[in-house]
Amino acid sequence: MFIKNYIKNIFSAVKSLLVGMKRTLYYFTHHKEIITQQYPDNRDTLILPERFKGEVVMPHNENNEHRCTGCTACELACPNGSIKVITKFDISPDGKKKKAIDKLVYHLELCTMCNLCVEACPSDAIKMAQTFEHSVYDRNQLTKTLNNPGSKIMDGVE
Amino acid sequence: MYRETEILTRANQSTAHESEDSGDLVINVGPQHPATHGVLHLVITLNGETIKNVEPHLGYIHRSIEKMCESLTYRQFIYVTSRMDYLSAHINNQACALCVEKGLQVEVPQRAQVIRVLMAELTRIASHELWWGAMAMDLGAFTPFFHAFRERETINDIMEETCGARLTMNYMVPGGVMMDIHPHFQQRVKDFIQLYRKKIHEYDELVTGNIIFQNRMKGVGILSAEDAISYGCSGPVARGSGASCDTRKYYPYDAYNKVQFDEVLETGGDSFARYLVRVREMQQSINIIEQLIDNIPEGDFQAKTKAVLKLPKGEFYQRAETARGELGVYIISEGGTTPYRIKFRSPGFSNLSVLGHIARGCKIGDLIAMMGTLDLVIPDIDR
């Protein structure tokens, strides 16, 4: 009885190993089921979903105008202090003072892509971009000014 | 005091040495060791090949998340909790959001509740898939890791499409979820379920039925139900010992009281039982997703909340079942915009504490296998 069990165990053990080996061999011969992506080579065809959170950007239209009013809602919403809004006062032609942004400084190195600033923005001035290759040699390059030089606020955005 | 100094001196001395009096061998595993899945430091006292004592040393990845949360508002602190147990980031966020909602007494819309449960269960599958691959790799099998990652990748793509990130999503906010689900979400999840059903038999063929795997798992690291309870274990570690502790069943939150699922229980208490619990739990998660995916109610995905959240003065506690066990979030509020104190009861910490108990008397070769079945995520233990 003991011998019978012993031999039975050996056969079941060998069978279990062969079943696993069969699976490995199946993938060895079925190349179409391999799903590996050749990442740096497939950059041109790589499409990231539109919601992917890569970095914060401020879209400008063709007249170099943005929608940011300088309300600092994003600065207050940010948990890490990645955003700093520097405001100035524009003097409109009729002599009134109007608050506007001078610079919207964005620290990419501090940002955790939590999307809270985009959610907080009342005028949809900032959004998340799909870029993700952020490596640079000098960390100063990661501190960015989001508004283009010479840009101004779009008409009708309050 | 003497004991502590002794352990520290032992830890600081060279990798292995024999103490003069007893002939015991003290070995340091980690903090930089691939089998500890993170920066965990184990000081192992050996008698020959038999383990006499295992002393885990923590603190190598302590980021003081609890203290950080005290200076963040109730909207902001949720994102940090993704970095605790990063494999079940959604469920961590969910627990925090639920706790804040409890304080605010906000009614979460039905749609948001269902989306939350769907996301949490997808996270649970992804976490168990990764554990399954890493578990097999701990025992020397490298191929299963890639098989597990193939399915996990599909979940990550779903997350990426809807939440915008693959690992630290920050998708749950107080009052609901941050964005509505992507139009393709339902179809993608159905495709995933199909793929999963087609591939799940490979898991048993490759690992579960394998004789080497079974011999290394069965009868190793036995934990009785009483010990599991007295050490405060939760999740699959406790359920592998037959201690019923599923928070989703006992304290249902969000839409869990609307779905039918079984609490997976094994009575073996050994490494193999804990393995089986996790593999069968993936099946239960698939069942939950199948019940909900066609029945996402219409409506808002977020309740209307004030721009600045203020919790009333008092204490709030909420538990949630992460992939590793019971996560507790405890908020003390003084009535301001930031919490006075936050405490997280992380499942990994209690599950790790049992390691010394189950490893005592076993051989050193089995230690890594036992540690694998505890499913440790070190940032969750240290916080």
Image (cartoon, coloured by chain):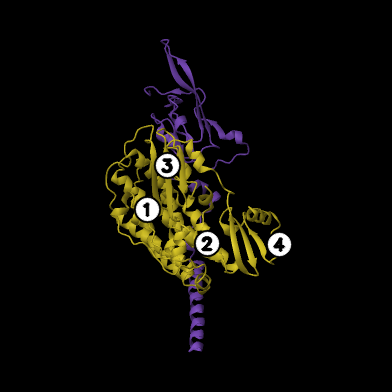
Is residue B173 visible to us here? Answer: no
Nearer to us of marks 1 and 2 is 2
Q: Amino acid at mark 4?
A: His
Q: Secondary structure at mark 1?
A: helix
Nearer to us of marks 4 and 2 is 4
Numbered badge on residue B188: 1
Is residue A57 visible to us here? Answer: yes
Q: Are marks 4 and 2 in contact (CB under 8 Å)?
A: no
Quarter of image, res B292: bottom left
Query: What is the drawing colour of chain A?
Result: purple
Q: How many marks?
A: 4
Q: Secondary structure at mark 4?
A: strand
Residue at 41% from the left image edge and 24% from the top image edge: A154
Q: Chain of mark 2?
A: B
Q: Are marks 1 and 4 on the same chain?
A: yes
In this picture, residue B223 sits left or right of residue B256: right
Q: Chain of mark 3?
A: B
Nearer to us of marks 1 and 4 is 4
Of mark 3 and mark 4, the one earlier in the sequence is 4
- Give residue B133's position: percent from left, percent from top: 50, 61
Q: Chain of mark 1?
A: B
In this picture, residue A138 sits left or right of residue A126: right
Residue at 63% from the left image edge and 36% from the top image edge: A138
Q: Residues within 10 Å of mark 1 (few under 14, many from 20)?
A: some
Of mark 3 and mark 2, the one earlier in the sequence is 3
Q: Secondary structure at mark 3?
A: strand
Of mark 1 and mark 2, the one earlier in the sequence is 1
Chain letter corresponding to the colour yellow: B
